[in-house]
Image: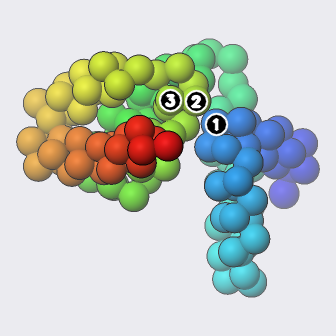
């Protein structure tokens, strides 16, 4: 493992997703899943999210579009919170989901809207 990439990735992951979420995820890691969490932290968050070529906001918008296209509502929920932390507005999310719906399919967009609304409703209740 590249310790520097892992540590930088952990810092970005905590900033984007929230320290509480990351702490819970890491605490739930066991012998089987720990390697996955370390891989994701080092490569996704450390090697990619720390690159200077795109802003975190842009990366969040891209993630929402790709996760919609892949129809991954669980990950969309996670990245909706991260996108908000990175300055993405609800209106921008709407546009991303609509754009993805045209190119990736309406059912995927419906699931993305449904997953995002669940998160946004939770946030609005607070």
Whether tag 1 and tag 3 are in contact, CB under 8 A, the answer is no
**For the residues marked 2 and 1, what is the alpha-carbon distance in whole angstroms?**
6 Å
In this picture the colour scheme is rainbow
**Residue receiving disc 3:** 84
* 8 horizontally vs 41: left or right: right
**Residue receiving disc 2:** 85
* Residue 85: x %, y % from top left: 58, 30
Whether tag 2 and tag 1 are in contact, CB under 8 A, the answer is yes
Q: Who comes first in sequence, dot 1 or dot 3?
A: 1
Q: Is residue 43 above or below residue 35?
A: above
* Residue 70: x %, y % from top left: 29, 50
Residue at image position (69%, 17%) is: 52
* Residue 124: x %, y % from top left: 41, 38
Choose top left, top right, bottom left or bottom right for residue 67.
top left
Choose top left, top right, bottom left or bottom right for residue 125.
top left
Observer-nearest residue: 98 or 18?
Answer: 18
Q: Which mark is residue 16?
A: 1
- Regarding residue 47, the answer to whether it shows in the image is no
């Amino acid at each position: 493992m590249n310790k520097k990439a892992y540590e930088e990735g952990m810092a970005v992951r905590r900033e984007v997703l929230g320290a509480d979420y990351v702490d819970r995820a890491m605490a739930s890691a066991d012998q089987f899943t720990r390697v996955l969490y370390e891989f994701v932290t080092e490569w996704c968050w450390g090697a990619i999210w720390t690159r200077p070529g795109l802003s975190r906001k842009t990366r969040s918008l891209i993630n929402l579009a790709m996760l919609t296209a892949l129809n991954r509502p669980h990950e969309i929920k996670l990245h909706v919170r991260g996108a908000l932390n990175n300055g993405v507005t609800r209106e921008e999310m709407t546009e991303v989901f609509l754009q993805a719906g045209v190119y990736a399919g309406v059912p995927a967009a419906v699931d993305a809207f449904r997953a995002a609304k669940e998160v946004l409703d939770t946030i609005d209740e607070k």
